[in-house]
Image (spheres, rainbow, N blue to C red):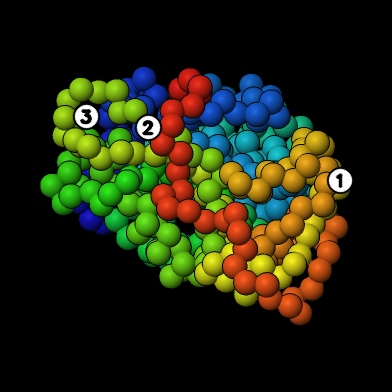
Amino acid sequence: MTVKHTEVQEYYGKELESTEDLKTTACCTITPPPKHIREILSQVHDEVLDKYYGCGLTIPNQVEGLKVLDLGSGSGRDCFIASKLVGQTGEVVGVDMTEEQLNVANKHIDYHTQKFGFKRANVRFLKGNIEKLDELDLEEGSFDLIISNCVINLAENKQKVLNDAFRLLKPGGEMYFSDVYSDRRIGADLQKDPVLWGECLSGALYWNDFLNFSKKAGFTDPRVVESHPIGVENEEIEEKVGDIKFFSVTYRLFKLDGLESDCEDYGQSVRYKGTIKGKSSSFDLDDHHNFPTGKMITVCGNTYKMLNETRFASHFEFFGTWDTHYGIFEGCGGNMPFKEEQGDGSLACC
């Protein structure tokens, strides 16, 4: 175990007792959770909620019956939410390396099994380092969904985390996670600061490095679901980080063959049926693909695959073939993929 890993364990296992002990707002969820998540949160044990340090919403739509892996599961908050949503036919596995956090999660498995009305527990927790998933008893290609909430920035070998995630996903599976990113590379001096690292700042990836890491792992077309600028709100730490801008971002990465590095036009369209639970009027694939129910929408080849070759296929009608290529698909892409404008979201550390 490296010095950095030990520092992270100490920070999240001993120094932080609750969200109130955080020194910045980086590990706070900016967007309030949707109604169905709030309803489940009302059933989650208070001790689990008190030791939650996430920065986003990591549970996508249409997860009933899925096998889910949570990287850096902490006190188990997101695992228990996922447990309720996947139901008795699904399974949730949480991985974390901090003993104190795992103790909280394991202590409340029976509580949530009873609270959710399950006959048996569908969630379990493993002690392990997310940079060494290949050392755990996890079957290759066995997970439908991998989630993570403000944890990958704490890893030193982020490429290894993404490589292993790709290996563990089934074809058509998805990695859906929130984390902290920066608008430039973080200097080595800041990376050595244990508080900045523990607060999810100095381990943040420069967004363009993340895109390259993802593509190298096999996730060819990373999609931003939502992004928000992070205000550090601590004068001492603001002085240290200077002009670096930080963002809380939720990404979705699909394990699909044939995705292209750019969005290409094959004259294809889709029509959403309105059948995804909780999304009867429209469905958002990412921050620039909204599908109103019943409306024909022209899409690029990659988006077509993300809908046609995943768990979303039965909820759409598909039109067109791959026979003719019409060039680049206009309307996708851009420079830095995050929004720099501060939204109306008030911070919600829950």
**Residue displayed at 27% across by 29% down:** 15
Q: Nearer the viewer, residue 260 or 194?
A: 260
Q: Is mark 1 on a helix, strand or loop?
A: loop
**Residue displayed at 51% across by 22% down:** 344
Q: Do the residues labelled 2 and 1 touch (CB within 8 Å)?
A: no
Q: Position of residue 98 (x, y in %)?
A: 37, 43
Amino acid identity at mark 2: Ile
Q: Which mark is residue 294?
A: 1
Residue 149 makes an appearance in the image: no
Q: What element carries label 3?
A: helix
Q: Do the residues labelled 1 and 3 touch (CB within 8 Å)?
A: no
Residue to which mark 3 is pinned: 238
Residue 187 makes an appearance in the image: yes
Residue 290 shown left or right of residue 151 in the figure: right
Amino acid identity at mark 3: Glu
Residue 139 lies, with reference to residue 340, above or below; the image says below
Q: Residue 230 carries which label?
A: 2
Q: Nearer the viewer, residue 136 or 311?
A: 311
Which quadrant of the structure image shows residue 306? bottom right
Q: Are marks 3 and 2 in contact (CB under 8 Å)?
A: no
